[in-house]
Image (spheres, rainbow, N blue to C red):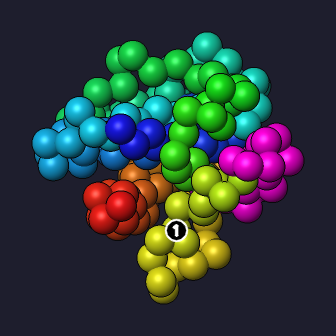
Amino acid sequence: MTNVLFVCLGNICRSPMAEAIFKDLVAKAGLQDQIQVDSCATSSEEEGHQPHPGARKVMAAHGLDYSYMHSRPITRQDFDWADYIITMDSQNMFNLNQMAPPEDRPKIHLCLDILPDKRGQEIPDPWYTHRFEYTYQVLQSALPAWLDKIKAH
Ligand code: 4NP
């Protein structure tokens, strides 16, 4: 079993969309029994909340299920559980590297680092841009490469 955890600041915009997209990719590849997917927040600001209405609208438009999702902050057990911790921006990277037990720090990655021509770039935060569909498209451009990498291991 490989466990993949998507993390952003609030767990209501970017990481829920990443979780839904990646679960769909895993299901389409028939790998549900081998890859588990979850998401969480670096902050407890939005704890208990459903995804943002803009994220819900985009996920619904793409046929993705978000009905079970509620924001939650990352815990010590998440660092242990996850094999891949995929983050959206450099602030997430900084915060998680501060929080993570040292042995779990190598699990923490920046989402767009998987694409050679997008290394070091951030997933735009629709909380600020209001461009939920664009963020969905950027995630959709990167996540198949993460599945390829995980399958290769
Ligand atoms: P997310 O977006 O990290 O992609 O879920 C945000 C959600 C909430 C806040 C900022 C970004 N906030 O400041 O509460």
Left or right side of 131 for 29: left
Give the percent coordinates (x, y) of residue 36: 37, 35
Distance from mark 1 CB to nearest ligand 1 atom below 8 Å: no
Mark 1 nearby-residue class (10 Å; few <14, some 14–19, many ≥20): many
Give the percent coordinates (x, y) of residue 56: 40, 31
Picture residue at 57% right of the left edge, 78% below the top: 119
Q: Is residue 101 magenta?
A: yes
Picture residue at 47% right of the left edge, 83% below the top: 116
Give the percent coordinates (x, y) of residue 59: 33, 37
**Which SS class for mark 1?**
helix
Q: The C terminus appears in which quarter of the rendering?
A: bottom left
Picture residue at 61% right of the left edge, 53% below the top: 107
68 up-or-down from 141: above or below: above
Which segment did they paint magenta?
88-104
Q: Please tell me which residue lies in front, 46 or 57.
A: 46
Q: To which residue does mark 1 refer?
A: 112
88 up-or-down from 40: above or below: below
Q: Is residue 70 magenta?
A: no
Q: The N terminus appears in which quarter of the rendering?
A: top left
Q: Is residue 107 visible?
A: yes
Q: Is residue 55 visible?
A: no
Q: Main secondary structure of the magenta part?
A: helix
Left or right side of 147 for 80: right
User: Which amino acid does the dot numbered 1 rest on?
Assistant: Leu
Picture residue at 29% right of the left edge, 27% below the top: 65
Q: Residue furthest right?
A: 98
Q: Please tell me which residue lies in front, 10 or 101.
A: 101
Q: Please tell me which residue lies in front, 133 or 70.
A: 70
Give the percent coordinates (x, y) of residue 78: 62, 31
